[in-house]
Amino acid sequence: MDLSQSSIQSQVNMIKEKMFSTHAPQYSFVSPSAYDTAWLAMIPDPTKPLGQPTCMFKNCLDWVLCNQNEQGFWGECDAHGMPTIDCLPSTLACIVALKKWNTGGESIKKGLAFVHANTEKLIREMNKQYCDRWFAIVFPAMVELANTVVGEQLVFPYSSIGVVSELLKKRQQILEKEKLVDVHQNSPLLAYLEALPASYDIDEDVILNQLSNDGSLFQSPSATARAFMATGSKECMAYLVSLVQGYDNGVPRTYPMDEDLINLCVVNQLVRLGIAEHFFLEIEEILAQVYRNYLNQEAWPKINSDVAAQLFKNSLAFRLLRMHGYSVSSDMFCWFLNHEDIRVQIENNPEYFSNALLNVYRATDLMFSGEHDLQEARSFSKQILEKILSLGTRDQTHLSSPNLRQRVIEHELSLPWFARLDHLEHRMWIEENYSNFLWMGKASTERFPCSHNSALVRLARQNYELRQSIYQNELEALKRWSKEWGLTDMGFGREKTTYCYFAIATSSSLPFDSNIRMMVAKSAIVITVADDFYDTEGSLIELKGLTNAVQRWDAKGLSGHSKVIFDALDNLVTEISAEYFQEEGRDVTSKLRDIWYETFLSWFTESMWSKTGCIPSVDEYLETGMTSIATHTLVLPASFFLDPSFPNSKLGPPQYENITKLLMIIARLLNDTQSYQKEKEQGKANFVSLYLKENPEADIEESIAYVRDILDEKKKEFLKQVLMDGFSDFSKPCKYLHLSCLKVFQMFFNSANRYDSNIEMLQDINKAIYIPLEVGKEKQPLKPNLKPDLKPLKPIPLYSGATSDKLKINSQYFNRPSSKHWMKGSFATQQVSRLQLASRVRFWGVSTPQKVRFCFT
């Protein structure tokens, strides 16, 4: 694989031309729905002469003919190109459409072979932890319809009895529990009109009363197609015509589609795959338009009929806009907290809101101080997500397998956003088979079209592997530097060359130059070695000599470890100063020396406390400790290179910006929450132990809780400084470098002191730098034309009755049009004669069984 920059740039240009050019239609971001397209292909043209029925939407029928997968199925693939569970009802619907118009005989055979060979495997995978609601309703109906229209029984292996029985049981539970129309249900049963059993003989007035202003039935093409066949509604027809005119390559699951939602999902995809840096202008343009629409309240309704979809969109918009510096209020998605009926709906049906609540929880990662509604939303969404993990979910709206769904929710709940390293997050998203997911629809997930997704994943993979190759080379050079200057052979303390490089390289996806990564990593290595020398190895005389040498910047009188540390530091400062002078023509040597002396002096002060038994006050400790943690020593020199206009005055105290001071205090407290026991044994001061000393009535848990409360508030304040303009003179790259540094410290000290461990980080380091990506290795291709030995067996019945509170009438599966409606005129105001009506009744009024007949062997 060509990992050159030019190869990547070539792919970027191709994707921009294909996906983001002015002539690229927006709907091309969404995969067409084979299921919904097939339903439109079933509709006969009422304008044709009697006895010569033809398809109203021939382009939909042509799409079905031309879009069968080589394996024999119609429908979506996951990110690895494997068929999803949705392909089973989609394939059957396409078979019915082809059989209805007596075309595509070979395609029908191939599709039936795929269904026979793979139904058991796909359903068994689905049933491991959940049964998707849409599938449970639709698949049995499509089997029933295919048995009737195709004219032969669909026969499945005898081993399928168990999994199919569970499926039928699930369908029965749904039909018994749910109402036909329910204002508290995002997708009520009537939204599945095309798949309801024959016992649901629904009066056309019920259907017409539920039509939206655009003429659709819950914005579902398949349900609206069925509604049109049942009622002949002019409004339904107008909706369907508009739909087909807008989508000439298969219709989507939902129409009209929310353009802002599409754009937000595309941006989210680019960010998660780690390739956003290549589409900076395109992302900025998209988010600027989304923000303009958000400010226009008429273009941004707060609540629509699909609460889950609206909540998903609003929380995603909030997160992306705030992350990119837009001023957005928490009201953008926290409106649901003020609607008791919506909260009750979510609490009573948590499994249908997994994707929406996951995005709500993610949005609250970007919480500022004083945003109490965001805190409430976080607590609420966390509670529901934990409940979903314990119960399972019927909402297959964002992942293609229950194991993946569980892993993602657990990942979100167990690992704070601040503790995640971008590079590893990108790897997870590239490797998992939900990487082509966009958002939810009535029928499970919306995905990127295969062509778009393949291009993006290919680019993401090459981008990731290019970074790996760069990281490997830089790490080897860094190891040579450490060894050359004697830092790897000190004989005491921690040798953390690899840890230091790993942290800076993987904490951000920003395209930092190599010199910045190396500069920060070298600084971190010197800090680690020198800090350990002051903590455990050096005598007070040695430490005083080294501190004085750094103050005057002269190694005279130094020897041993002190001389090694000073020489390495001198080499580093000289290298940084020379490079900056060459690039910008300014000499920053004195400023760099000053900031290092300040750091060494803080280490000496802490050593004096430890070695003399002096116990500082909490305030004294923090004043010194926020310097000794040395985060400012890492980020401020690097900021010179990120921002050429960076003023020298910002490099030393007391001119530190508030964002830098916040980083210093947060990093110190994070360290102290995980190091207090070790430092207690070493006789070192620590904020946790000092708080206990000044508050003897408290215990250790209360002290740690107190520190974490401070951290929580400081991180909110820090995040606002990073994301919003007007709080600092720093450029965005400088502020994001501060954020990367905080994420490194949160990662190291989130739940343990990972920095001190010699093995804790090894797996992450290997995945980030050495281990190749594993894409597409989780599944084996399904066999397309496997023909099992089939023997007839007594079929098991499928639930087809309605409970007592359901509508009970006697029409067949394809409801015959009501003469009351059809004699009034339909199909674009054309009058329908009794002869034409009789013809249509013969054509669509097939005699369907009351039960789906599965045959097993």
Image (cartoon, helix red, strand yellow):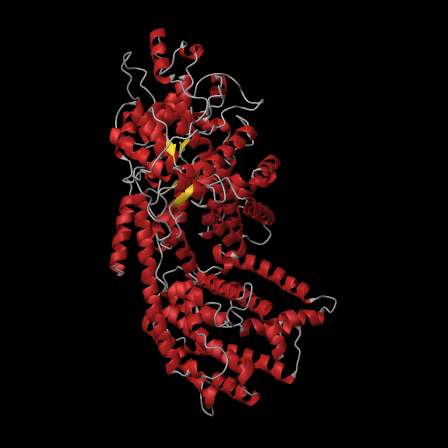
Q: Nearer the viewer, residue 768 or 268?
A: 768
Could you say where residue 609 lies in the image, as x and y percent from the top left?
62, 81
Could you say where residue 662 lies in the image, as x and y percent from the top left?
54, 64
Q: Nearer the viewer, residue 204 or 530?
A: 204
Is 44 located above or below residue 744 in the figure? above
Q: Total number of numbered labels?
A: 0
- Residue in the image at 26% along x and 61% along y: 4
- Report the side of 641 relative to 653 (left or right): left
Give the position of the N terminus as an image quadrant: bottom left
- Residue in the image at 46% along x and 31% along y: 137
Residue furthest out toward the bottom? 557
Could you say where residue 549 lies in the image, as x and y percent from the top left?
48, 86
- Report the side of 274 relative to 722 (left or right): left
Q: Quadrant of residue 177?
A: top right
Is 286 located above or below residue 236 in the figure? below
Give the position of the C terminus as an image quadrant: top left
- Report the side of 196 relative to 465 (left or right): right
Q: Nearer the viewer, residue 482 or 253?
A: 253
Could you say where residue 546 lies in the image, as x and y percent from the top left?
50, 86
Is 694 located above or below residue 87 in the figure? below
Residue furthest out toward the right? 697
